[in-house]
Image (cartoon, rainbow, N blue to C red):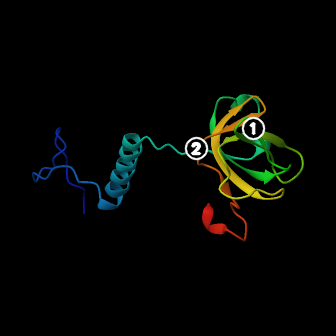
Amino acid sequence: MRPAKREADGRTARGRGPRTPPAALVAPALAGALAAVVIALTGNTARPTVTPAQLGPAEIGGSFQLVGIVAAVPRRRHGLLELVVGDGTGRARLRVRYPGPPPEPLRVGERIQVAGTYGDRLFVAEPDTLVVGCGSRRRPEHC
């Protein structure tokens, strides 16, 4: 069987218009557009999750989710909790300043996650973003 001849406006000689795309192609496109609108309206943009080893001069001023292991005893200084967070390999360490008390006592070796901004060799955390035990067997539900 030969394909139908098309007129200049896209209709076939029998008067039918161009074929509509199948629902399998339209549905994902609409879902993607809807997701983009929701993100734009709510202002929720995902922050990249990084370890101390992944932060360098190129990332200064960026907003991140920092994941690491408490590498030194946390101290309180001028109303801020000061931490040293490592990547678990011993190669990279980063100072973290967190405003407010931790959600629970922190110990050396505890895995944490915190949101904030990276400065030159200093991570300035946002209030109420510190999660203790992120990814540990003891508390896997936190992250």
Q: Nearer the viewer, residue 5 or 88?
A: 88
Q: Secondary structure at mark 1?
A: loop
Residue corresponding to mark 2: 47
Instruction: Name the residue: 68% across, 60% down.
Output: 134
As drawn, is 81 to the left or to the right of 16? right
Residue extending furthest right? 90
Residue 52 percent coordinates (x, y): 77, 43
Residue extending furthest front? 78
Residue 117 percent coordinates (x, y): 64, 35
Q: Nearer the viewer, residue 95 or 32?
A: 95
Residue 53 percent coordinates (x, y): 80, 43
Q: Place residue 57 in its image quadrant.
A: top right
Q: Secondary structure at mark 2?
A: loop
Residue extending furthest left? 15
Instruction: Name the residue: 70% across, 38% down.
Output: 79
Neighbour class for label 2 at 10 Å: few (<14), some, many (≥20)?
Answer: few
Q: Nearer the viewer, residue 103 or 93?
A: 103
Q: Quadrant of the N terminus?
A: bottom left
Q: Amino acid at mark 1?
A: Leu
Q: Amino acid at mark 2?
A: Arg
Q: Place residue 61 in its image quadrant.
A: top right
Residue 30 percent coordinates (x, y): 33, 51
Instruction: Name the residue: 76% across, 51% down.
Output: 68
Separation of disc 2 and disc 1 at Cα? 14 Å
| In this view, 52 is above or below 135 | above
Neighbour class for label 1 at 10 Å: few (<14), some, many (≥20)?
Answer: many
Q: Could you say which disc has been placed on residue 55 in the image?
A: 1
Q: Nearer the viewer, residue 106 or 122?
A: 106
Counting residues from the N terminus, which is met first, the one under dot 2 or under dot 1? Answer: 2
